[in-house]
Image (tube, rainbow, N blue to C red):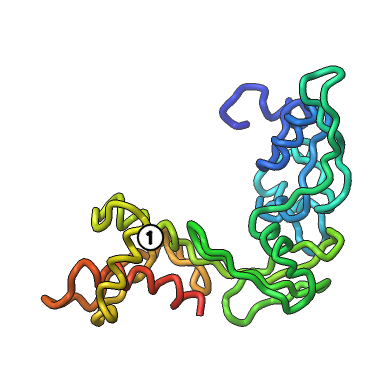
Amino acid sequence: MENVDGAYERAKNGELLFGTIDTWLVWKMTQGRVHITDYTNASRTMLFNIHELEWDQKILDAFNIPRAILPTVRPSSEVYGQTNIGGKGGTRIPIAGMAGDQQAALYGQLCVQPGMAKNTYGTGCFLLMNTGKKAKISDHGLLTTIACGPHGEVNYALEGAVFMAGASIQWLRDELKLIDNANDSEYFANKVKNNNGVYVVPALTGLGAPYWDPYARGAIFGLTRGANRNHIIRANIRIYCLPNS
């Protein structure tokens, strides 16, 4: 807005709109009739007050963001509108739910009651535990975030993230060239009985929970003349388990 003439005024007048990916999808599916997001996605923008469940005016003022540019925030489960695929007279299908990826995973694995938790392994590892109607503050470096209750209402959760999981296998394949395919990692890791004292710090994109240090950098420790490719691969796989424990 600062770099385009007239953009800020247009934003204040509601002529320019902001949204997360769910906002864009609903906007496109309804041919621009619905400009919304849900609580879980709004919470990821860092502009949303997760306790008052509304856009945080103090943060908006600090960053000079017009409120008119932001989507309406709705619960994760209700009918937001209908698709209009194909234009006038097109296919009409109710759009009845949306959620951020990890909150959707928590709900999809039926962790809808306080104390229920899930851990998703993919590019990274993401542990979420439903804490119910009240936001809990962790003593161990976990984030407080929004989750979905049994009927799509707002619950809260504690979240921990490990940024490098499957992505570390990609690193072994694409950058170190230790394997040709991701599936090879298991084969080579099983060719040795242990990691032979080799340890990998998976801070290739910083460290997640409980340190949240974007400036941390990765390292391989314990290398000796007895260490080989298989030990490094096995140690790399072990990093999924150690941070999550």
Amino acid at dot 1: Ser
Left or right, 23 with reference to 204: right
| x then y, percent, for residue 155 | 80, 66
Q: Quadrant of residue 21?
A: top right
Q: Quadrant of residue 183?
A: bottom left
Q: Examine the rendered structure and indicate whether residue 114 appears above or below residue 91.
A: below
SS at mark 1 in the image: helix
> Mark 1, residues whose alpha carbon is within 10 Å: few (<14), some, or many (≥20)?
many
**Does residue 13 appear in the picture of this structure?**
no
| x then y, percent, for residue 223 | 19, 75
Left or right, 101 with reference to 107: left
| x then y, percent, for residue 27 | 75, 32
Residue at the limit of the structure toward the left, as seen here: 225
33 or 49: nearer the eye? 33
The number of discs equals 1
| x then y, percent, for residue 99 | 73, 52
Tell me the residue that label 1 is attached to: 168
Left or right, 223 with reference to 182: left
Residue at the limit of the structure toward the top, as seen here: 88
The residue lying at 82 percent from left, 40 percent from top is 95
Q: Examine the rendered structure and indicate whether residue 205 appears above or below residue 131.
A: above
